[in-house]
Image (tube, rainbow, N blue to C red):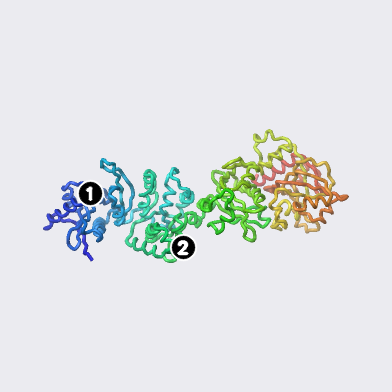
């Protein structure tokens, strides 16, 4: 093995002239890639102690000429190794001596023409590209600036090393996602951009491996390359430490051969990862699924670093969300519940992929990852039943008082249309619960059933589909909505908005708690599950009543007054107005016809229906769009309203009331909700 050594040239030494001559000879032999330099510059550098000599077996085979133009830097002007010294490690030995001679310096750099093809050489010195500039040649050459951090840690490195926050090192694909312009097509960038959220800086320290500079060097176009390099000043670059290449080789050897043989880029990924390991990082963040698969199951156990996607990392540090948890009493009452997703489960594509539009599973997963990458504002949730079957999928976030829905899917099968309707109503309710003013739906692959459902429910056509939300209709929007039929049609398309101060028939209907729970979804905490699951997924219901009152004008409004169960203890008496609905039909039918047509939409048993019948006939009220009052109206307050509007207080049977009573009930309920 050759003996190599490096030492500074002593211009006053006995061998100074011979050494100087050898340096000039080496320069002449290699000037094609070194460039022109006056001989006087060599002598001047030597006198200033800026000329390092390198020997192989005692013979001078190389030199390094450098300068120290700024307080924090060392600039390599020439790094020259003759043919007989190449492959011996001489260049690295000389540069190492230069670094050791200047422990107070922070950066060592070199400028080299791209067309020299010396990238591998500079990388062997653990230097990485950090920028470019135009060269001086007439041919229009480009110089790449190669750099390496040396010396004592600067202020930013020290803060990083002493920080109690978790350290996450970003892969090149994540860096490019974060800092490239929209002109650079990056279909997956949304997932990485979650790392740019304000809350992240309080929980994570973000850094980059020196290898990012190498990857950026091949990025096109050049203006994007420069843009990203400039933006990298926001991140702390890791220092290249001794042992990186040996560790990178070891990491590759532990990866499954089935993956490394097919993906040669894993060797480069291993250098990124080795830098992260040596820096003591907690996470290495990448969108490279091959790297994630190649390190799964062993990287954390052996090296204490996790290789994760941006979305998975962000889900580990979920901050208080702007969006309240997904919930729906109506859906929960039929055994369905929303479950928040923090990482993509197996089989998600099979459950919700839009096959009619030939949607690709990879694109669908990227769409979901983009939602997971914004945990401060967005949530991804799946609607499941007791058996774990997936019924619906929603990805939504709050932005500027809008509920933005980027993912909305209904499960496949015969209940798709029914679930679609419930999803739309649920989105409106969710937005109102979060005091938002609009729902904006942008899922391009939600399927024709959902698209048609949104349009039918009053959303604007096309994408994004939008609907504005207020509890009470804006006067200017409903000036031409006057008749009961016009009001019913408008409210059906703009649910849950209600048009007040209209001459629409109103009925007060007493209902026992056991029927209120099932029929209008009222939950008094005594019972949380409907016996008939299908009722919770319907828009329309039926109420069977004694045919004492005739001449029903429809559409009409009904206020549901919950009483108490017959023969029940007084403590079970609710005695409140709890909800309102729209009556769309009132028909006098035989018990047999009523049972045949409407058994599935009601909750009364046959015996109970026959008890309400007179001469074999029963009044069938079909109603829709039931809304619970934000604050129920207690009996004492309701009696006060009845007195004001001249309505008899007895509420044993249904009775008509003036339209103004309905308006006052809604206003008082909302005033109670707002604390007025």
Q: Residue drawn 33% across and 62% down?
A: 243
Q: CA distance from mark 1 to mark 2?
A: 47 Å
Q: Secondary structure at mark 2?
A: loop
The quarter of the image holding the N terminus is: bottom left
Q: Which residue is mark 2?
A: 296
Number of marks present in the image shown: 2
Q: Residue 524, image x and y in percent?
A: 71, 55
Q: Is residue 10 above or below residue 483?
A: below
Q: Residue drawn 69% across and 45% down?
A: 669
Nearer the observer, 229 or 47:
229
Q: Which badge, 1 or 2, comes first in the chain's sequence? A: 1
Q: Is residue 71 above or below residue 486?
A: below
Examine the image and state in which quarter residue 570 appears. Answer: bottom right
Can residue 491 be seen from the camera position used here?
yes
Q: Residue 379, image x and y in percent?
A: 55, 52
Q: For mark 1, does the 10 Å Cα neighbourhood hold few (<14), some (14 to 19), or many (20 or more) residues?
A: few
Q: For mark 2, does the 10 Å Cα neighbourhood hold few (<14), some (14 to 19), or many (20 or more) residues?
A: some
Q: Secondary structure at mark 1?
A: helix
Examine the image and state in which quarter residue 492 appears. Answer: top right
Mark 1 or 2: in front is: 1
Q: Residue 81, image x and y in percent?
A: 22, 56
User: In this image, 477 relative to 42: left or right?
Assistant: right
Nearer the observer, 138 or 68:
138
**What label sits on residue 32 in the rendered view?**
1
Report the residue that reaches farthest toward the left.
14
User: In this image, 621 relative to 211: left or right?
Assistant: right
The quarter of the image holding the C terminus is: top right
Are the two marked residues, 1 and 2, in contact with CB atoms closer than 8 angstroms? no
User: In this image, 659 relative to 352: left or right?
Assistant: right
Can residue 111 be seen from the camera position used here?
no
Q: Residue 601, image x and y in percent?
A: 75, 51
């Amino acid at each position: 093995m050759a003996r190599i050594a490096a030492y500074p040239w002593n211009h006053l030494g006995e061998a100074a002239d011979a050494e100087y001559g050898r340096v000039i000879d080496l320069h002449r032999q290699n000037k094609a890639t070194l460039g022109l330099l006056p001989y006087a510059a060599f002598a001047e550098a030597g006198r200033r102690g800026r000329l390092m000599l390198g020997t192989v077996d005692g013979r001078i085979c190389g030199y390094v000429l450098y300068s120290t133009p700024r307080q924090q830097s060392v600039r390599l002007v020439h790094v020259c190794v003759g043919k007989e010294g190449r492959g011996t490690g001489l260049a690295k030995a000389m540069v190492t001596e230069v670094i050791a001679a200047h422990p107070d310096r922070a950066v060592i750099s070199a400028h080299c023409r791209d067309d020299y093809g010396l990238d591998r050489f500079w990388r062997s010195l653990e230097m990485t590209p950090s920028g470019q500039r135009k060269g001086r040649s007439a041919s229009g050459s480009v110089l790449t600036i190669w750099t390496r951090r040396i010396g004592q840690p600067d202020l930013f490195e020290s803060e990083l090393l002493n920080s109690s926050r978790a350290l996450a090192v970003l892969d090149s694909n994540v860096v490019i996602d974060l800092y490239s312009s929209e002109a650079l097509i990056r279909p997956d960038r949304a997932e990485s951009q979650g790392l740019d959220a304000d809350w992240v800086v309080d929980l994570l320290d973000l850094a980059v491996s020196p290898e990012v500079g190498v990857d950026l060097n091949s990025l096109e176009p050049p203006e994007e390359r420069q843009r990203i390099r400039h933006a990298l000043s926001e991140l702390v670059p890791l220092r290249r430490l001794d042992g990186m290449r040996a560790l990178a080789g070891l990491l590759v050897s532990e990866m499954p051969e089935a993956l490394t043989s097919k993906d040669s880029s894993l060797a480069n990924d291993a250098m990124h990862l080795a830098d992260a390991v040596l820096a003591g990082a907690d996470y290495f963040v990448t969108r490279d699924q091959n790297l994630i698969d190649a390190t799964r199951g062993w990287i954390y156990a052996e090296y204490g670093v996790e290789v994760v996607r941006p979305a998975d990392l962000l889900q580990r540090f979920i901050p208080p969300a702007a969006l309240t948890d997904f919930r729906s009493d109506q859906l929960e009452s039929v055994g369905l519940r929303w479950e928040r997703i923090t990482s993509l489960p197996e089989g998600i594509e099979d459950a919700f992929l839009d096959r009619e539009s030939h949607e690709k599973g990879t694109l669908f997963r990227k769409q979901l990852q983009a939602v997971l990458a914004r945990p401060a504002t967005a949530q991804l949730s799946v609607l499941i039943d007791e058996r774990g079957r997936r019924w619906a999928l929603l990805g939504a976030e709050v932005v500027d008082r809008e509920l933005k829905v980027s993912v909305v899917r209904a499960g496949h099968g015969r209940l798709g249309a029914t679930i679609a309707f419930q999803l739309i109503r649920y989105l409106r309710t969710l937005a109102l619960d979060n005091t938002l003013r609009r729902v904006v739906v942008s899922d391009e692959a939600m399927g024709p059933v959902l698209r048609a459902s949104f349009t039918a429910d009053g959303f604007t056509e096309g994408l994004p589909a939008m609907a504005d939300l207020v509890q009470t209709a804006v006067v200017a929007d409903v000036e031409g909505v006057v008749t009961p039929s016009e009001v019913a049609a408008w409210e059906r398309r703009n649910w849950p908005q209600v048009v007040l101060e209209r001459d629409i028939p109103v009925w007060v209907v007493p209902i026992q708690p056991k029927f209120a729970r099932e029929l209008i979804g009222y939950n008094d905490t005594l019972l949380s599950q409907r016996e008939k699951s299908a009722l919770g997924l319907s828009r329309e219901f039926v109420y069977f009543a004694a045919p004492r009152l005739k001449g029903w004008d429809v559409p009409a409004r009904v206020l549901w007054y919950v009483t108490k169960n017959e023969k029940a203890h007084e403590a079970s008496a609710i005695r409140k107005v709890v909800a309102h609905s729209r009556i769309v039909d009132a028909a006098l039918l035989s018990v047999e016809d009523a049972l045949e047509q409407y058994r599935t939409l009601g909750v009364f048993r046959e015996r109970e229906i026959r008890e309400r019948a007179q001469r074999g006939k029963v009044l069938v009220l079909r109603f829709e769009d039931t809304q619970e009052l934000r604050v129920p109206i207690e009996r004492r307050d309701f009696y006060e309203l009845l007195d004001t509007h001249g309505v008899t207080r007895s509420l044993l049977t249904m009775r008509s009331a003036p339209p103004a009573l309905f308006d006052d009930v809604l206003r008082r309920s909302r005033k109670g909700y707002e604390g007025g």
